[in-house]
Image (cartoon, rainbow, N blue to C red):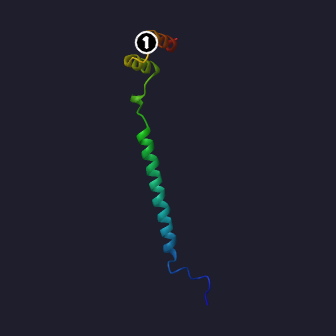
Amino acid sequence: MMWGYYNGGWGWWSVAGFAWMILFWGAIIWLVVWGTNRLSRRDASEKTTPIEIAKMRYARGEITKEQFEQIKKDLTA
């Protein structure tokens, strides 16, 4: 008898199927990571400077004019 030579009748197909499964799940994981990074990344044109943030806070009324002037003075010095 040939003990150990019978592998369920699949042979190399099981190895090929396993390889395709690894490639498939690897592609899915890569796609999720890439999509998450793509959606969370901000363009260079959207980056705001500290002065612009202070201007927006002043415009919303979160800080007073004196506080805005102090922030501007501190950031430009």
Horizontal and vertical percent position of residue 61: 39, 17
Residue 12, above or below 62: below
Horizontal and vertical percent position of residue 49: 45, 22
The three-letter amino acid code for the residue at tag 1 is Thr
Horizontal and vertical percent position of residue 50: 46, 21
The residue at the point 48 percent across, 56 percent down is: 26
Residue 20, above or below 45: below
Q: Would you identify the image quadrant in which residue 36 lies?
A: top left
The residue at the point 43 percent across, 28 percent down is: 47
The residue at the point 45 percent across, 13 percent down is: 68
Residue 61, above or below 8: above
Q: For this rendering, which residue is in front, 12 or 28?
A: 28
The residue at the point 47 percent across, 53 percent down is: 29
Q: Which residue is mark 1?
A: 64
- Residue most extreme to the bottom: 1
Q: Decide if residue 19 is on the left or right side of residue 44.
A: right
Task: Assign a secondary structure to mark 1.
Answer: loop
Q: Would you identify the image quadrant in which residue 27 lies?
A: bottom left
Instruction: Classify 10 Å Cα crowding around label 1: few (below 14), some (14-19), many (20 and above).
Output: few
Q: For this rendering, which residue is in front, 53 or 9?
A: 53
User: How many dots with numbers?
Assistant: 1
Residue 4, above or below 34: below
- Residue most extreme to the left: 59
Image quarter in which the N terminus is found: bottom right
Q: Decide if residue 53 is on the left or right side of residue 8.
A: left
Horizontal and vertical percent position of residue 76: 49, 13
